[in-house]
Amino acid sequence: MNSTVTRVLRILLVSCGAGVIAVTFATSGVSASTPLVLGTVSCHASMSNARPADYSTTDVRVTTFPRATVTTTAHYKTKNTVHSTTSNASGVAVVPYEISGATPGYRVIVIVSARSGSRTATCSTSFTPIK
């Protein structure tokens, strides 16, 4: 590494839509910035439908480590529901939740944990059932 890079004034972390973390170094005396890709995001969760109707199904979509054990816990008003699966070779897992009699208007928080060897990651998403 040259001496210019060691005089870092600012490091900017950017989470890109593709799930890549980039670091931009801004140094004194240098006008250009140098992006450095660090790797993929370790856990990201979203819902296929964040406002599912009663007696329908919504999926928790997870992007994490390839072939990771993925556990989701949905925190309903009166109970917690846990599902487990394994992510595919690309690190994607889809976990369906049947919405049967859930309290309409109550925001259900879904906590996701992923484990692959010694690597672990957590993230969350939510959905709110409607009538």
Image: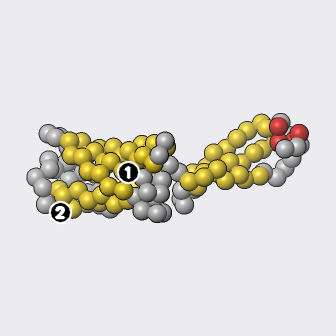
Q: Position of residue 112 (x, y in %)?
A: 36, 46
Screen quadrant of the N terminus: top right
Among numbered discs 2 and 1, the one appearing first in the sequence? 2
| Front-lying residue, 82 or 116 | 116
- Residue sitting farthest toward the left: 101
- Packing grade of label 1 (10 A; few <14, some 14-19, many >=20) is some
Which residue matches tag 2? 56
Which residue matches tag 1? 69
In the image, what residue occupies the spot 17% across and 62% down?
A: 56
The amino acid beneath tag 2 is Ser
Mark on residue 52? none
Q: Is residue 55 left or right of residue 71?
A: left
In the image, what residue occupies the spot 45% across and 48% down?
A: 116
111 up-or-down from 94: above or below: above
Quadrant in which residue 121 is drawn: top left
In the image, what residue occupies the spot 50% across and 49% down?
A: 42
